[in-house]
Each structure stands twice: as C-alpha cells, then as structure tokens.
Image (cartoon, grey):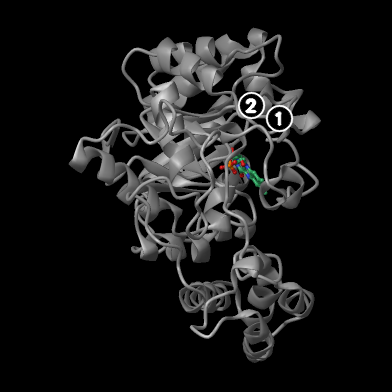
Amino acid sequence: MRIGSLTISSNLFLSPLAGYTNLPFRLVVREIGGVGLCTTDLVNARSLLEKNKNAFKLIETRPADSPLAVQLFGSVPEEMRDAAARIESLGFASVDINMGCPVRKVCNVGGGSAMMIPQGGTQTAALVRGMVNAVKIPVTAKMRLGWDDDNLTAPDLARALEDAGIAAIFVHGRTRQQGFGGTVNLAGIRAVVQAVKNIPVIGNGDVITPQAAKKMLDDTGCAGVSIGRGAFYNPWIFQHTLDYLQSFRSSGRQSALTSNDSETNNEPTHVGCYEKRDGGLPPEPVFAERVRVMCRHLDLMVEVFGEEPGCRMFRKVAPWYAKRFGPCHEFNKRVVQVSTQAGFHEVLENYTRWRQQFLDSNGELQPRFRPPPLVASFMRETEPASTQREHIPVPKGPVEVW
Ligand SMILES: Cc1cc2nc3c(=O)[nH]c(=O)nc-3n(C[C@H](O)[C@H](O)[C@H](O)COP(=O)(O)O)c2cc1C
C-alpha cells in the first residue's frame, strides 16, 4: 500500500493511544508482525521545536520501529510547518496531524477538534498546505466524523485537505460529541471514502477482530484499517487479520460476513478469542505465548523507561494481557503493586500455579473458564460484557474524548 511517496507492507495501522502505544508496545506488535505503519502518541509541535525533553521521549524510536509516523498537535501554522520539517530531518517516515483534541484552550485557538468545525475548514486547509510545502515526507490527518451529528464535516474537510496536498486521511467513525459511546458509523466512514478523489482513507474505531477489520474494509471501501485498543487486547491482531484477509484472496471464496453467514446470526462456535466462522482464522495464542509476549513487553518497558518507572507503567498494561488468561483476579490485584522486574516474575509464577486449578488434563482452560470471544461493536447489537466500552480505560484529561 502507498501513502504518498511511502510504500508500506500492509494496509493495517496502529492507532495512537497516548500513554500506551509507546516504543516498547510498537516493538512488540512489530515483532509479531502484520502492521504496516505505526504512529507515535500526539506531540505538541511547539514543545518539539523547543527541544523539550518529554516531547523527545515521545518520539524515541529505533531502526526496528520503522516505518513510523509522528503525530503533531498544534494550531499555529508556522509551528506546525517547522515541526514537520524537524520531524523530516530526524528521519521519520511521515507526519500526522491530530484533529481530535477536545481541550478548550486548544480548540479556542483553532487546533484539535476545532480544525473540524465548519467555519474552520479554510484555515485547516491552509495550515496543512504550509506543512505539505515544507516537507517531502507524506503529511496525513487523523479526524473524527465531525463535531456532532449535525456537523458531519469529515467528507468536506477530507476533500479540502486532499486539494491542500494531504497524503491520507485516518477517520475514527464517531463524532467528537460521541466520545467512545455508541456504535462506530461505517456509513460515515464510507462518506469520507466517497468524498476524496485519489488519496487513501483509513477507517478506525472498535476493530477488535479480523472479521471486524474485513467488515470495515468491505462496507466502507476504505483502503486500510487502523487499530488502537484492539491491539492492546490482542497484539496478534495485525498478523491474524492479514492471514484472514489473505485466506479470502487465495481461495477466492466469498466473504464470511455476507449473506446468512454473518456474525449476528450464526451460532457461536468460537475457537479462542474470535468467533470461528471458517478456516481463515488462526488459533488463539496459547497461555505460554501470551506470557512470553507480555514478558517481552515488560523487558522493553524497563529498557526504555528504566526499571521502576517501566514496571509502574506496566501496572496498567499487564491487565490487558490478563483479559485472555481466564480467571485473572489473583494476577490483576497483585500486578498493580509491582515496581521491580523480579517482583513481576514472582507475581506471574504464583499466578501460574494458582491458575492450574482451572485447567483440564491437557493443560487447557476448562471450557467454562474460557473468556468469551471478542465481537466488535458494529458486528452485533449487544456486546458481550468483556468488550463493552466501559471496560476499556479511557484516561481523564486531554485524551478523554478523541
Ligand atoms: C487512551 C487513549 C489515548 C488516545 N490517544 C490518542 C492520540 O494521542 N492521538 C489520536 O489521534 N488519537 C488518540 N486516541 C484515539 C485512538 O487513536 C482511536 O482513534 C480510538 O481509540 C478509536 O479506535 P480503537 O477503537 O481502535 O481504539 C486515543 C484513544 C485512547 C482510548
């Protein structure tokens, strides 16, 4: 797939989740495979120009963390232009513009979500044009469908930004007013796809299974899918989705999600974390593999942030892995206290022993203790408890309603 001058190996993207999709997590998903392009957490353009230490920590990377986009946040055209040039000079693959930040002091001066209000379109296009003219790397934009249901500005804005030279649009299928509630609006994403002439539109929102990725691609015509929280549930999702999509291409068979064979009306005969519909889905990673990847993630957190800060940050990460362990309260209540790697491994060893009571003679979780399969919000009317939005931590503060 191409984004402007950049060729990427797949049409699957890691969405920025401030505080989560840092260098260690990006390395974890890249080692598993399947992801085409990752993006940093949002970075304040001015802080980058002032060489602020924290801003530089946010864009810390390594050759294995490539290709990587830096997401910029700001409203002053000159600062955004110069920050884009700085990013290019540092060797990053592309620069992304955050058009979702809801903080009042940013919106009041025309940044973040305010870039999407109807009156803001011309200014936004001018800011984008300034950035595009300053760099050779692709400039992309990440937006929502609009401010609210009465102002679905994304299609018009996407068209204006294409004229200004933007290389791709990422669109989360909700309005700013929706926050994370309700169902992702696939028709809204489709309207953005139809509004642009040549650039790729990448759909985003609630893709937590390969089937959901396929449905978003099929129903919207988007060129790729960007996955945020789904990657935290399941860092294997990119590789599994690629394999799943490939199984349709190589066999020429019909989508498993059309006609009578849809997720909404089949009996769930799930194997592992996905509802099993056909042979195209890989099996769920076994417990030992989940533990291996989780420990690798912690090693990288310690390498990048130091032992104590890395372990403390990992307290909010480990429970995401534990969601697929089966009964996990013994793990979750102890892991939130760890501050050393040795302490973490002690918690894990004790938990692994405790978990044995739920296993059968083959060492597999007994069926009644297996977590329910994951199903995306737009794939069924009632979500199982494990995938409801309130179970997904959305931090307070600036990133409250992206
Ligand atoms: C904790 C958290 C942090 C986020 N940080 C950012 C960010 O830095 N930049 C951004 O454009 N979007 C951010 N988002 C929005 C996500 O990139 C994404 O659009 C949204 O979560 C929907 O996709 P998903 O359902 O695949 O997670 C954040 C979302 C969450 C939950």
User: Quadrant holding ligand 1?
Assistant: top right
The CA distance from mark 2 to mark 1 is 8 Å
Q: Position of residue 277 (x, y in %)?
A: 42, 45
Disc 1 secondary structure class: loop
Q: Is residue 16 above or below residue 239?
A: above
* Marker disc for residue 182: 1
| Residue 140 appears anywhere in the view | no
Q: Is mark 1 within 8 Å of ligand 1?
A: no
Q: What residue is rendered at 66% in x and 91% in y?
A: 346
Please state which of residues 308 and 402 is positioned toward the viewer in this rendering: 402
Inspect the image, locate mark 1, and give the three-letter code of the amino acid beneath it. Answer: Gly
Residue designated by label 2: 174
Q: What residue is rendered at 66% in x and 32% in y?
A: 381
From the viewer's perspective, tell me whether residue 122 is left or right of residue 280: right
Disc 2 secondary structure class: loop
Toward which corner of the image does residue 205 lie, by quadrant? Answer: top right
Q: Is mark 2 within 8 Å of ligand 1?
A: yes
Quarter the C terminus occupies: top right
Q: What residue is rendered at 38% in x and 20% in y?
A: 165
| Residue 94 appears anywhere in the view | yes
Q: Position of residue 186 (x, y in %)?
A: 53, 23
Q: Nearer the viewer, mark 2 or mark 1?
A: 1
Badge 2 crowding class, 10 Å Cα cut-off, few under 14, some 14 to 19, many 20 or more, is: many
From the viewer's perspective, tell me whether residue 321 is left or right of residue 221: right
Inspect the image, locate mark 2, and give the three-letter code of the amino acid beneath it. Answer: Arg
Q: Is residue 57 above or below residue 116?
A: below
Please state which of residues 6 and 318 is positioned toward the viewer in this rendering: 318
Q: What residue is rendered at 32% in x and 51% in y?
A: 279
